[in-house]
Image (cartoon, rainbow, N blue to C red):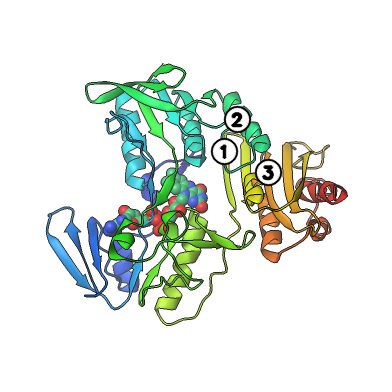
Amino acid sequence: MPYYVGRVVDSEQSLVARTPEAFRKKQNIDVRIRHEVEAVDLAGRRVSGRDLESGAVFEKPFDTLLIATGASPMVPDIPGVRSRNVFTLSSLEGGVELRRFVDENAPKRAVIVGGGYIGLEMAEALLGRGIETALIEREAEVMGTLDPDMGSLVSGAVEEAGVALYRKESLTGFEVGGDAVRAVVTDQRTLPVDMVILGLGVRPASGLARDAGIPLGEKGSIRVNDRMQTPVEGVWAAGDCAESFHLVSRRPFWVALGTVANKHGRVAGMNLSGGDEIFPGVVGTAVTKMKDTEVARTGLMEREIRALGLDFVQARIDDRTRAGYYPGSAKITVKLLAEKGSGRLLGGQIVGGEGSAKRIDVIAAALHAGFSAGQLLYLDLGYAPPFSPVWDPVLTAARVLVSSF
Ligand SMILES: Cc1cc2nc3c(=O)[nH]c(=O)nc-3n(C[C@H](O)[C@H](O)[C@H](O)COP(=O)(O)OP(=O)(O)OC[C@H]3O[C@@H](n4cnc5c(N)ncnc54)[C@H](O)[C@@H]3O)c2cc1C
């Protein structure tokens, strides 16, 4: 049964990896959905909360506790922000609600606030539904996890896709009529709307842990060691609510990504059930796309490198994703950053057509290995004309980087 229509998932059911029943049957795990934990009593070793359907209060004792409460979307404190046509997208239910709104109300104009991963992916989805879409971004370019010179390529792709992009512009308020926002007000204009999507980023959902007295770390995430253990005996944390370690900066780091959350979960699960597994850390790898433009980043960006007080060199090259003469090759831009002197690779960013984004994985692996630009340059990567030029664009960028030392 095909689930994909074009490139959009057709049924939300296909997004459910495992149901509570499957957990019960296959692993004898008692999954209670619609149950919210409201407090953790560390001294009494119990959690308490509420059944959200019946309202009944529950209490559960524990020997070992894993906190995996995820992240919460940032919502500005602006009158009208709770209106029925204002959405954040942070859960499957939220996505279903948003889609239902679009199906039932056939909105003509949407404004997205925030040009990060969620903002871009939502812009593409709304355009796909024929909705006139505007995007407001406070910074000079979208994708603040890229350096501005690379972000500008993504801004170009956003505009080319047909989104009205307003950069260096901030949301200041909403004009509300009845139970809906009728217009989005920025510091420069008023945009009439039928729906609003807020993609302003997320923060760790660590309130439960904080209130229980569990120490927090980077950006308010739950502090853990490399076994995913919090400083409190018998209490573990994993996923978007928990801290990671950055292998390039060698500092605590917080990132909310499924890639990291899955690994956290594996390591925490193995350790709390008696194993001995280490999660070494992350390099900050992420990919996304805007229509045909793929976007990828890993490691440190210029701003982060400067904040660490490191001197760096950089190279940025324009190339093709396949041999130039081969049909279907697309433009690709690769940027690499390395420490001046040692040549240690610090980060990389890629923007380009089909086949661009996953090339970031080579750079991510090089960062894990602590490679210098010179070591990256001579990696034995595969080549045939349908897949890449004979020097893969990542290697070409390394070649230029090495010559800039
Ligand atoms: C639209 C969207 C697209 C994304 N795309 C990507 C992508 O392409 N690649 C990628 O790597 N990552 C992506 N992510 C991020 C990824 O989904 C998260 O990093 C991942 O789901 C985190 O897993 P988690 O288990 O830590 O948290 P979650 O999946 O958020 O799960 C936490 C759960 O805890 C529950 N909970 C919270 N508090 C309580 C409480 N007090 N009591 C009981 N339950 C509670 C929440 O309801 C939630 O179900 C995306 C996220 C979004 C929103």
State the image coordinates of residue 142 (x, y, percent, origin top left).
Answer: 56, 34
Question: Which of 20 and 265 lies nearest the eye of the viewer?
Answer: 265
Q: What residue did someone put label 3 on?
A: 350
State the image coordinates of residue 317 (x, y, percent, origin top left).
Answer: 78, 40
Three-letter amino acid code of the residue under disc 3: Ile
Circle 1 crowding by C-alpha within 10 Å: few under 14, some 14–19, many from 20: many
Select label 1 or label 3 by which is in front.
Answer: 1
Question: Which of 215 and 346 lies nearest the eye of the viewer?
Answer: 215
Question: Compared to 145, does 229 lie above or below?
Answer: below
State the image coordinates of residue 368 (x, y, percent, origin top left).
Answer: 66, 63
State the image coordinates of residue 61 (x, y, percent, origin top left).
Answer: 22, 74
Three-letter amino acid code of the residue under disc 2: Ser
Numbered disc 3: secondary structure: strand
Mark 1 → mark 3, Cα distance in angstroms = 12 Å
Q: Which mark is residue 155?
A: 2
Q: What residue did someone put label 1 on?
A: 143
